[in-house]
Amino acid sequence: MTSAMSWKRPGEAQSAGERDLEAILKQVERWRGAPLRYRPVSGGISNANWCVAAGEAGDYFLKVPGRGTEMFIERGAANDASRKAHACGFGVEVVDFLPDVGVEIFAFVEGYRASSNLDFLRPKVRRNAVLALRAFNDSEPLGLTKTIFDMIEEHVSQVAQVGGRLPADQAFLMRRFGEAKAALAASGLDLVPCMNDTLAGNFMIDEADRVLLVDFEYASNNERVCEIALWFDEMAFPETVEREMIETYFGVWTPQIDARIKVLKALADLKWATWAMIQEAVSTLDFDYYKYGAWKHMRARTLFHHPDWPAWLRRL
């Protein structure tokens, strides 16, 4: 928890991050003349997160875009997704958007906290999270369509642009990617609004285990099953729990859904591994992106090298 002593007022900035925030605060019309205070909020590996207290108007949450994030994030599309999530009943209210700097301002949700992987050991949390995610996936289409294939191909190009590192077996990884892309495209895609970033911390829970979804920066219309596959990647559930959640989401478990999830797990790990190699080259945040990316590459390989890989592709 951040102590009350960490609150600052405009004009008290000492770090570059605080100065960036104060410059943004000056642009918010609704806060003209308000007695503002701000403090950092922990979490996130792309941006700097802040809580802003605006006197009687209450508390708000905003994030200052991290260096280089414009390579991955279309802030207008993210705002579109945030508003649709709130409309479907499982998102946080967006109270303002500054398109010139790409900053969304949200109501600060009292009584909720970011979940952890440990919270998902509880069946009630898992079920509520599935229902929240399904509601967003079933909402009206977003203005941006970007499939998992688009993301990976874009990231590979961006790694070259920034001089990032790629693994020695990149050619093999891309051959597997090509096989998966061809098989999934032939099977047909179910394009729906997806968060595309289902970290545990992007599910907020309260004491009753109710769930809200947050952080739609990477949201786009994407293959529905990719959303579930990425989630399973992040949570490392045992197969019994994955099957339970598949049945909750789809109403049934089938070998076809299972194969689709396995193939898309590999692609999701490849996507985030490649993203990490770009971030290693451009980000100023204190985070070991290379270690994160190397871990993701290793997980992708476990599926790309799996003896059942050809059978999964045929089963799609």
Image (spheres, rainbow, N blue to C red):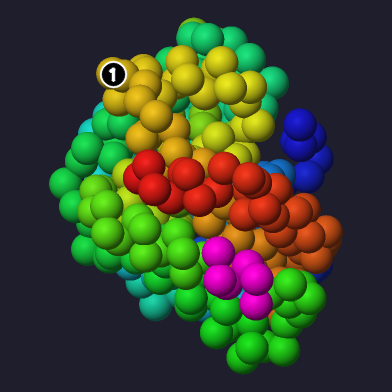
Residue nearest the observer in this picture, 125 or 309: 309
User: Residue 230, relative to residue 75: is it above or below?
Assistant: above
Q: Residue at x 41, y 24 (%)?
A: 246
Which SS class for mark 1?
loop
Residue type indicated by callout 1: Gly
305 to the left or right of 310:
right
Quadrant that contains the N terminus: top right
Q: Residue at x 57, y 42 (%)?
A: 308
User: Residue 148, relative to residue 131: is it above or below?
Assistant: below
Question: Residue 212's x, y, as percent?
Answer: 43, 29
User: Residue 69, relative to residue 261: is it above or below?
Assistant: below
SS majority, magenta: helix
Question: Residue 280's x, y, as percent?
Answer: 75, 72
Question: Does residue 223 appear in the picture of this structure?
Answer: yes
Question: Residue 80's x, y, as percent?
Answer: 28, 57
Write down the residue under mark 1.
Answer: 251
169 to the left or right of 238:
right
Quadrant that contains the C terminus: top left
Q: Residue at x 72, y 89 (%)?
A: 163
296 to the left or right of 82:
right
Q: Residues within 10 Å of mark 1 (few under 14, many from 20)?
A: few
Question: Residue 127's x, y, as percent?
Answer: 43, 16
Magenta span: 171-176
Is residue 40 within the magenta segment? no
